[in-house]
Image (tube, rainbow, N blue to C red):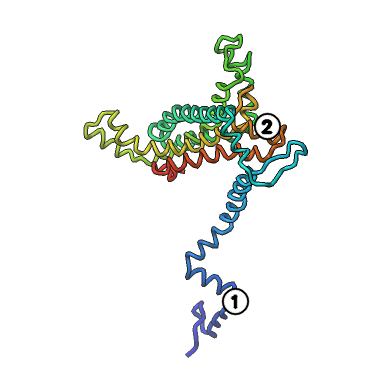
Amino acid sequence: MSLLSPTGRAGSAVPARRAEPDGPARRLAAWLHRHPSARLSALLSAPLLWLGVAYLGSLAVLFISAFWTVNSFTGEVVRQPTLDNFRAIVTEAVYRTVTLRSLGVAAAVTLIDAAIALPMAFFMAKVAKPRWRRWLVVAILTPLWASYLVKAYAWRVMLANGGPVDWLLGGDGNGPGYGLTATVLVLAYLWLPYMVLPIYAGLERLPDSLLEASSDLGARTGRTFRSVVLPTLVPAAVAGSIFTFSLSLGDYIAVQIVGGKTQLIGNLVYANIGAANNLPFSAALATIPVLIMVIYLVAVRRSGALEEL
C-alpha cells in the first residue's frame, strides 16, 4: 500500500522533523518556564539594580556627606563624621524659618491644586461624554509638553509690573509681582496636572450605578457625596498631593525666577552648592525635604493613597 502525501497523492511519506539540539539556551528557557518566580526575579533585576544604584545609592551618598564639613581656610572637604551641619540647621533661627516657609508654600500649592482639580476631574469623569474624556485628558497633559523654564518665565512676564495680571488688578504694581504669592501661583500652575489625573482616575473607577442607587434610596446630594464619593475621592486626592507637595517642597527654579528675595529650602541648597561651595552643608539641608516626605508617606500609607499611584 502506497503512502499518501499531504496533497493526497501517492508518494513517499514526509520525513519527520529533526529534533533541535538541547542546548544551554533551551535548557535555561525550560527551567525558567518551570520556575515563574525565578523568571520574575530575572525580569525585575535590571530595573531594581538601577533603582538601587541610581536612587538609593545617591541618597546614601547624600546622607553620608551631610556629616562632613568644609575647612574654612582651604575650602577642602573634611571627611570626618560630625554633627556640626545638623546642629547649625536646628539651632539657627533662619533655617527653621525657611523650613516652615517651604512647608507653608508646599501646603498652599497642594490646597489650591486640590480645589481646582476636584471640579475639573469630576466633570471629566462623570459629566463629559465618553468620547470627549480622552481629549480632556490630552488638554490636561498639554502643558507638560512645554518646557519648565518657558512656563516659569511666561508667568514672570504676566505677574511683573505692566504684565496682564498686574493690568487686570489695576496696574501700578498692584499685581503679585515677585515674591511668595507669585511663587505659590506659579507652582500651583506647574503641578496642577499631577493633582487632576489621580483624582480623575479615582472618580472614573466609581460606578455610576452607586450614585444612582444612592439617589434612588432617597439620599440627598450631600449624603451621597459623603457616603459614596468621598471614600473614593480622599485616597485619590492624597495620591495627587504626594506629587504636588513633594515637587513644591524641593523646587528652586521657579523661586529663582518669580520669588524675588524669597528663600526656600531649594534655594538654600542651590546657594550652598554654587556660591558658597559647601557641599556637605547642602547635603544636610537636602535631607530636610527627604525626611519630611518620608514622614508624610508613612502618615498617608493607611489612607490607601499609595495604591492610587
Q: Residue 19's spot in the image, x, y percent? A: 56, 80
Q: Is residue 188 visible?
A: no
Q: Residue 103's spot in the image, x, y percent? A: 52, 30
Residue neighbourhood size for the residue with mark 1, other residues' Cα within 10 Å, grouped as few (<14), some (14–19), many (≥20)? few
Q: Residue 96's spot in the image, x, y percent? A: 55, 30
Residue at which label 1 appears:
23
Secondary-structure class at tag 2 = helix
Foreground: 248 or 216? Answer: 248
Farthest residue to the bottom: give it.
Answer: 1
Foreground label between 2 and 1? 2
Farthest residue to the left: give it.
Answer: 217
The residue under the point 64% across, 37% down is 282
The residue under the point 68% across, 41% down is 69
Q: Is residue 121 visible?
A: yes
Give the CA separation, mark 2 to mark 1: 60 Å
Foreground: 83 or 141? Answer: 83
Looking at the rendered structure, the kind of residue marked 1 is Gly
Foreground: 107 or 116? Answer: 107
Looking at the rendered structure, the kind of residue marked 2 is Ala
Side of 31 where 67 appears, left or right:
right
Residue at which label 2 appears:
271
Secondary-structure class at tag 1 = loop
Q: Residue 1's spot in the image, x, y percent? A: 47, 90
